[in-house]
Image (cartoon, rainbow, N blue to C red):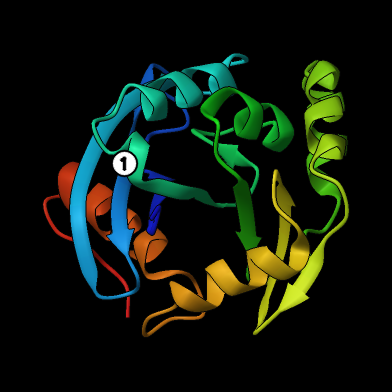
Amino acid sequence: MRRHTIAIDDAPFDKLRGGDVPVLGVIMAGPTLVEGVLMTSVPMDGGDVTPRLASWIRGSRFHASLRAVLLEGLTIAGLSVIDLPLLAAESGLPAISVDRKIPSGRLESTLEKLGMADRIRSVRAAGPLHEGDGLHFACAGISADEARKVLAENRGRSVLPEGIRLAHLIGQALVLGESRGS
């Protein structure tokens, strides 16, 4: 039975310096059991982030037990846009992107202004936003109802899935020496 999820978040980075950004993946079985932690890096504002993440996930010893990939938002490492359907197809796992608030739509205009209009297709490929338990989410490779179940099964103390919260905290500790926040 595939019962684990991988929750992915980037670590803090200097937007003016560029270079590679650390990316953490936390393997969770529900909201309380951490089964493993993975780390990779992707270039800030890189254009090939989706295949890199998919390859990283597929190459993990945890891949066979994973049932979904959880992300906070469609961007990572600055303006590296994750293509949810492509991530689902290339990783072999459903992909779910969560947001606490409805995205403002400024991402597309920012990409356009910065000469990254080719990434707008990936933003739009995420499909419609769905609502569930205080979150807005997009999903690929899984129905909205099934995605709601995965999100509910992985919620801990926060509205976010616990794995995303932990990936965020671990990334902060890695870069800043300690995690911050409430």
Of 70 and 4, nearer the camera is: 4
Can residue 49 be seen at all in this image of the molecule?
yes
The image quadrant where one finds the N terminus is bottom left
Q: Residue at x 48, y 18 (%)?
A: 52
| Mark 1, other Cα within 10 Å: few <14 / some 14–19 / many ≥20 | many
Coordinates of residue 146 in the picture (x, y in percent): 67, 66
> Residue at coordinates 37% horizontally, 85% vertically from top-left?
157
Q: Where is residue 72? Give x, y as percent.
A: 55, 54
Q: Which residue is mark 1?
A: 24
Q: Amino acid at mark 1?
A: Leu
Name the residue: 61% across, 30% down. Answer: 87
Considering depth in this image, is 42 or 155 the residue closer to the camera? 155
SS category of the residue bearing label 1: strand
Image: 100 above or below 47: below
Name above or below for residue 45 compared with residue 70.
above
Tell me where residue 39 appears, x and y as whole percent.
25, 33
Q: How many marks?
A: 1
User: Which quadrant of the view contains residue 41?
Assistant: top left
Check the picture and name the quadrant holding the C terminus.
bottom left
**Residue placed furthest toward the left:** 177
Q: Horizontally, is 62 left or right of 55 in the view? A: left
Asked if residue 81 shows in the view, the reply is no
**Residue 18: x %, y % from top left:** 43, 19
Residue 178 location, quadrant: bottom left
20 relative to 168, above or below: above
Give the residue displayed 47% in from the left and 26% down from the top: 53
